[in-house]
Image (cartoon, helix red, strand yellow):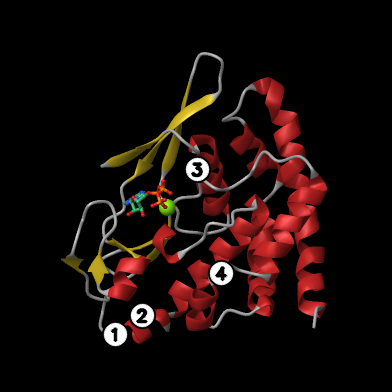
Amino acid sequence: MFKESFEGAAEEVVAFELGRLLGLNVPYTEAIRGADGQVQAALMRWVPGACLNAVIEGIDRNCQRDGREVRSPGGSLEAWFGRPEVRDQYIRDRILSAILGDHDRRDMNYMVTPDGRLVAIDHGAAEPFEENLAAVEAKMRDRLANPRSRTLDRRMQVRPEDVEALWGRVGSQLTDGALDRIVANFPPADRARILETWKRRIALLPRVMRDVLAAP
Ligand SMILES: Nc1ncnc2c1ncn2[C@@H]1O[C@H](COP(=O)(O)OP(=O)(O)OP(=O)(O)O)[C@@H](O)[C@H]1O
Ligand SMILES: [Mg+2]
């Protein structure tokens, strides 16, 4: 089953493609393009399970699934939060959202599958096409220094140095060739500009991470 997405379709496509390079679980997403080559909609794989907020509350109120009881996969919520692979995925999503300037990484924008995997959904607030580097840097700093998901950060015990360490392992996946293949989703006239902003963001990220770590 797939989900149709119209608003934020191009953003969802970019988040899927970049997220996949970073080893993040993002549901398979495919662009639907018009005759002009612009992304008009996206088809996204439907993820089984429940949103993370529903798992935390024990009740699923998302998407008209009103009042359905939800159990934590494999026992207690604390045990689930303690799974290394869950935390690892959460940090990968932080890296993706720092690159994309996506501030909307609340618990309702993660799914938990019946076997307990964390899946990042709803990257509609991402800004992959912003070209103003100062604006990009401000958002990157904000995502790294001031996450909007402090409760989740605490429960996952995520610190800026953990994000930097994981970046050290996955950053090299974002090669020029891989980025080239992703911009092929967009009209030829736009590709060079899009590629430029992504390369600048990737070059900027290590410095912003160091600044955040050095901050008191
Ligand atoms: N790929 C998916 N698989 C399963 N469920 C999904 C998927 N995408 C979205 N959903 C469900 O639909 C809800 C709304 O989708 P999404 O978050 O993408 O849109 P939204 O417009 O941002 O809505 P909201 O304002 O509630 O965040 C999600 O919270 C989730 O319950
Ligand atoms: Mg959402």
**Nearer-the-camera pick, 75 or 145:** 145
Q: Nearer the viewer, residue 66 or 74?
A: 66
Q: At numbered mark 1, what does the secondary structure look like: helix, strand or loop?
A: loop
Q: Earlier in the sequence, mark 4 or mark 3?
A: 3
Q: How far apart, in angstroms, are the residues tagged by discs 2 and 4? A: 15 Å
> Considering the image in quadrants, where does the C terminus appear?
bottom right
- Contact? badges 4 and 1 (CB < 8 Å): no
Q: Which residue is mark 2?
A: 80
Circle 1 residue: 76
Residue picked out by circle 3: 12
Q: CA distance from mark 4 to mark 3?
A: 19 Å
**Amino acid type, callout 4:** Ile
Q: Position of residue 128 (x, y in %)?
A: 64, 43
Which callout, 2 or 4, points at the residue further toward the start of the chain?
2
**Mark earlier in primary sequence (2, 3):** 3
Task: Say what secondary structure mark 2 lies in.
Answer: helix
Whether ligand 1 has any atom under 8 Å from the Cβ at mark 1 is answered as: no
Task: Tell me residue 117's x, y (percent).
Answer: 36, 67
What residue is shown at x 43% (from left), y 58% (from top)?
Answer: 109
Q: Amino acid at mark 1?
A: Ser
Does dot 3 land on a helix, a strand or a loop?
helix
29 or 5, nearer to the observer: 5
Label 3 Cα neighbours within 10 Å, binned few <14 / some 14-19 / many ≥20: many
The residue lying toward the viewer, choosing from 85 and 216, is 216
Residue 91 badge: 4
- Kindly check if marks 1 and 3 are in contact, taking CB atoms under 8 A apart as contact: no
For image coordinates 50% across by 59% down, the residue present is 24
154 sits to left or right of 177: left
